[in-house]
Amino acid sequence: MIAIVLNMLISCAPTNAAGASREIDPALFRTPYMPYGVFDELPTISFSVGESRIILAYAPGELTLPKDQITAWITRSAQAVAGYYTRFPVATLRLLVIPVDGRGVRSGTTYSYRGAATKILIGRDATLSEPEEGTTASAGS
């Protein structure tokens, strides 16, 4: 199984033979693994929380909420974590938001294979209050 996923990720070069960028298949993000190689192809937003850096990317797909509102929720959540621990727990975190069917924050998973990384699945039809309500609910998912 791991070999299949690795082959899928390796085969996803950022450009085609002519050097033009290609569209990334959203299915590559819906695996039980963190798609580190594909993450590196996405446009990112980088921000600091104390001495730590969070690199945020959005997987392809539609979201009802504007990305700037989701980014603000993520920033507030990261600052709350840093406040609780007196610092953010890792120096650098890759954070991948993946749109999925439904509403609210569906789940989140953290990885460490190639550095700290977290995938958060957010329902396409989430409303502004749902990410806030899902902050603690998703921690046990």
Image (spheres, rainbow, N blue to C red):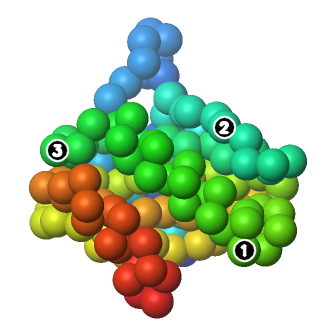
Query: Of residues 134 and 99, which is closer to you in this image?
Result: 134
The location of residue 127, given as percent across then percent down, is: 19, 55
Q: Which residue is mark 3?
A: 64
- The kind of residue tagged 1 is Tyr
Q: Residues within 10 Å of mark 1 (few under 14, many from 20)?
A: few
- Residue 108 position (above or below residue 97): below
Query: Which quadrant would the C terminus be assigned to in this image?
Result: bottom left
Give the structural element (helix, strand or loop) at label 3: loop
Does residue 136 appear to the left or right of 37 in the view shown?
left
As drawn, the residue found furthest toward the bottom would be 140
Q: Are marks 3 and 2 in contact (CB under 8 Å)?
A: no
Q: Which residue is mark 2?
A: 47
Disc 3 to disc 2, C-alpha distance: 23 Å
- The kind of residue tagged 3 is Thr
Q: Residues within 10 Å of mark 2 (few under 14, many from 20)?
A: few
Disc number at residue 84? 1
Q: Are marks 1 and 2 in contact (CB under 8 Å)?
A: no
What residue do we see at 13% from left, 66% from top?
Answer: 102
Give the structural element (helix, strand or loop) at label 2: strand
**Mark toward the start of the polypeptide (1 vs 3):** 3
Does residue 114 appear to the left or right of 26 in the view shown?
right
**Mark toward the start of the polypeptide (1 vs 2):** 2
